[in-house]
Each structure stands twice: as C-alpha cells, then as structure tokens.
Image (spheres, rainbow, N blue to C red):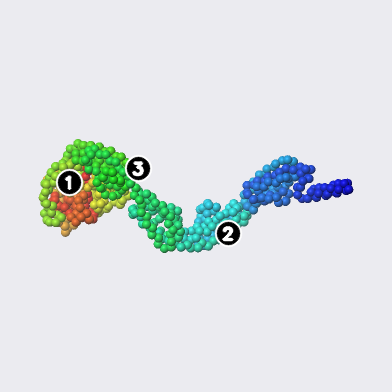
Amino acid sequence: MKRRWLAAAAALALLWAAADWMTLEVGVLKPLVLGAGSLRVEANAERAQVRLDGLPHGETPLTLAPVLAGRYRLLVEHRFHPPAASEIEIRRGERLLVPVELAPAYGGLLVATNPVGASVTLNGERFEGLTPVALDSLRSGRYQVVLEMFGRETVAQTIEVLPGERRELIVELNRVAMSELRVRTAPASARVRLVDGPLPYSPGVRLPVGVYRIEVAADGYRTKTRSHRLHKGVNLVDVTLDRLLGVLDLQVTPSDSQVVVRTGSGRFQPFQRGVPLPTGPVELRIRKAGYRTELLQFRLSEAGRTVRVVLKRYQVSGGERLQDALAGGGMAPRLVVVPAGKANIGAADGDGMRALPAQAVLIDEPFAVAINEVSLGDYRRYAEAMNLSLPKAKGMDSDRHPVVNVSWREAVGYADWLSRETGKLYRLPDEREWAYVASRWASPAAPCQRGNIADRSLGQVFRQWQVVDCDDGFVRSAPIGSFQANALGVHDLFGNVAEWVNDCGPSGCGSHIARGSAWDSAGDELKPAFRESYDRPSDTRGFRVVREL
C-alpha cells in the first residue's frame, strides 16, 4: 500500500515538472536549471511598449524578474517616436538596466479659424503668427492648442501630431458679449490700469464681459486694486483713493518768519505746525523782512520729515546786477536790485480802469526785477523743458523779441519754473512794484528814444491808427533792450509790450492787470499810470519777472 502511494506521488511530480517545463511562462524549474536574472527598461518617453523576442511585456518604465538567462531581441515602441530595437543578453543572477533613447519624429499641423487672425498658443508657448498658421516641422506629440481673439470666445483643444502626418485643426470662434468700462476717480487725475486686461485702459474701452482687476493710483494716495465683473453694456466704476498723510516738523530761525506751503499742484496756504500734510511734492516759501527768502522743494512720505531752516540776512545795494543759473542748463533773465523806498505815482487821464488815483507807493523791502521783458528765447527753454507749444506772432519771432501771445497763467507758469530751476523765488511783479520801478526811475528821454510805440513806422502800415509824430524804426515789437533804459537800468517799461502783473482785474481774478504801453500805444496809453484788465493773451502783451532776495 505504501509503495503504491509513493509511486503515485512520484508520477504526479513528474507530470507537474513536465507541465512546468513545457509552459511558455518562466515557471520554477527553468530558472533553477537554466539560471535567471532581472531586466529594467527605461525610455525617454513614458508608456513606451516593451517587447522581448516579439512578446509584449508592458510599458516603460518596466522591471521584469525573473528573466531566464540568454539572448533576447528588445523592441521599444512609442506612437510619437520611431521604434528602437537592440540585442541584449541576460546572465544568471544579473540585474540588467537598459536605457533606451527614442529618436524624435516630426509631423505637420495646420491651424485655421473663422474669422482669421487669432493668436495661437501651443503647450503654453505663444506662436508668433496669427491664424491661419502652418507648422510643417512640428515635433510629434500631444499639444494643447489655445486660440484667442479679442471679442471672441477662447477655444482650447488637444490634438496629437503623429510622425510623418499632417493634422488639421479648424475652429469656429464665436462672438462674446462686450462691455464698456468707464472709471471715475477721486482725485480726477488718478491713473487707471487694467492689470490683466487685453487692452490698455482708456475711458469707454470695450472689453469682453468678464472679471477684470482694475488698479487706480495717484501720487500721494494709497493705490487700490479691485476685481470688478463687467456686464454687457456700460459699466461705471467709482474709485476714491485714500490720501496719504505725513507730518512736517519745520523749525525756522527766526521763529516769527512767514511760512506758506503748497502740496502737489494746489495753492499756497499758511503752514500750520503739527497738522498732517498730503504726501508727495511739497514746496515751502519762507520770508521775513530783512532776510533772504528761502524756497524749499522736497517729497514728503508717510514717515514724515524734519526740516531746519536758518534765514540769512541779505546785504544788497540798489542797482546791483544778479543772474541765476538754471538747473537744466542756461541762465535765468538778468536782474537788477530795486532798493526800498517811496515814489509818487501820477493819475492817468480818463475814467474806469484807466484812471489810477495819484498816490505814494511805499516799498519797504528791496527786490530784484528783470532788466528786460522775458524774451522768446527765454521762454523757449521753458516750453521745451515742459513739452509746451511755443507762442507765435507775426514779425516778432526771433529769440530776442519779447514773448507775446501768452496768457497770465502761462506767465505765472514760467515764473514757477524759474523758481524750481534756480531754487530762488521768482514771480510776476505786483502793481505797486511795477509802478515803483517805472515811476521813480522814469527816463526823461523823448518817447521814440525811450521805447517802441505807435509811431510813423507803424502808421505807414496801419494808416487808420493814432500815432506819435516820431519814428522808432519798428512796426511791431522791437528786440528787447533796443531802447534807452531808465535810470535804474531797466529797459522797455515804456512801449514794446504791455506787461502782466500779479493783480486781479476789477471784477475778480477772471481777468488780470497789464501795466505799461505797447508797440501800438499812443495818446493816454503812454502815460505812466495807464493800466488795463484782460482775460486773454495778445500780441501786444508780454511780461517780466521779479525775484525775491
């Protein structure tokens, strides 16, 4: 009985061994008899198919164990690459690593849209051209294609480019609803920017309906960036910026000096200690009788600032000549120091604006006045620096002629520019100062020797005009300094062009006073006290500047 059981077991073992040996699988006996190792196949493309002697074994990266010792034909295939074949040998107990470099392959892709002109992005990289575009040497692979056109829906599609094939992608781009954006800001001068918009912002810009980030910024204000959903039609967005403030600790000697301050492009106001000021550009003007005026310009931050100023006493003499250099190159107009004193101003004939009552004018502080009217050459430097157009006038277009056809505000702008360029305080003269210089040092010379007025030369061109019976040789204005100066050395206070002064007109500051006669003046207009009010420029009006000492 025992023998029969042993014989049966032996028979079963022989049958199992024969079956194990004959199977296509590696099994148990083959590795023991023939030997085995392991194989790892890695490729430069994921999920490449691996075959050994024609039989599939899986996708890269692939590890096979055990693998019977012996020689094999290894084939690695991928749909985007040519196949790579090689002979390998696996030895008993060996761990074999086979790296496979699949060669690149190329195909073609045609991308077209209706309408044409869409931008094309392939796998996140923007293509230079617009649809239709033909890519004839495109590396095989899978591509995410994004098509964009302003006012049309964005389309994203995935397409495979196969070796040696040319694929076509034709897409219809549908219209999207459009919105109109207008941003109202406080302050009105704030800058508006679309952070991620397809177009730069301008009032009324048309954008596809959607969500946009809008940035509003202005000097001296806290920048705001907000997301806004724009709907079809007009979208009005209001943004109010918060003012940034800082404290200016100003210490002035002498302590009773007069201090005015201007922030940004506002007006000068009395400085109040301890009161926060808007951050950004700050301008200080510090004055005291007997001391030189100080002009300071700087930027104030939220951290605040401490400024210490010690005014210096001036030592000047009447008639002393001055001239300041401009920071941008060149020189400011030449000046002469006007001493303090008193002058009697006579009355003009007539009534209304032209009648200035006789009075004594007292000037208790010396100042400097420009020897000449501001010339076109002087004004040209300012216009070029500020990117402004240059005023023009017939027959008065050389740089030595006085500048004309400038408004009162343009004249003030030039004086402010001189202040910034020189660090000294320039401005228009007030009426008292102008009359003081014109009357106290008036020249006794004959009219056509003192200045350019309506004379016989003008009468030959403008025959209906009233003229003076003398000849100065000019029809319109003359180059500055062409005539005899007054006793202080100042030219053209008589004739040439009337001059804007700081004072407002009789009905308010919609108009301003001009003093002096011009190249078209005769009769009462030649009298020292003549004055008139204007609200616009003319080719008979210019200006001169004064500088505080």
How far apart are the alpha carbons under marks 2 and 1? 84 Å
As helix, strand or loop, the secondary structure at mark 1 comes to helix
How far apart are the alpha carbons under marks 3 and 2? 62 Å
As helix, strand or loop, the secondary structure at mark 3 comes to loop
Q: Is 225 positioned to the left or the right of 514 in the image?
A: right
Residue drawn at 19 percent across, 39 percent down: 290
Q: Name the residue under label 2.
A: 168
Query: Looking at the image, is mark 3 or mark 2 earlier in the sequence?
Result: 2
**Quarter occupied by residue 300:** top left
Q: What residue type is labelled 1?
A: Glu
Q: Which amino acid does label 3 sit on?
A: Ala
Q: Mark 1 points at which residue?
A: 433
As helix, strand or loop, the secondary structure at mark 2 comes to strand
Q: Where 473 falls versus 336 (above or below)?
A: below
Query: Looking at the image, is mark 2 or mark 1 earlier in the sequence?
Result: 2
Classed neighbour count for the residue bearing mark 1: other residues with Cα under 10 Å, few (<14), some (14–19), many (≥20): some
Residue nearest the viewer, comparing 455 with 277: 277
Residue 29: % across, % down = 78, 45
Residue drawn at 17 percent across, 42 percent down: 365
Q: Nearer the viewer, mark 3 or mark 2?
A: 3
Residue 66: % across, % down = 72, 45
Q: Is 259 positioned to the left or the right of 146 in the image?
A: left
Q: Is residue 292 visible?
A: no
Residue 327: % across, % down = 30, 41
Q: Do the residues labelled 3 and 1 touch (CB within 8 Å)?
A: no
Residue nearest the viewer, comparing 364 with 87: 364
- The circle drawn on residue 303 is 3
Q: Which of marks 2 and 1 is in front?
A: 1
Q: Is residue 20 visible?
A: yes
Residue 507: % across, % down = 19, 56
Classed neighbour count for the residue bearing mark 3: other residues with Cα under 10 Å, few (<14), some (14–19), many (≥20): few
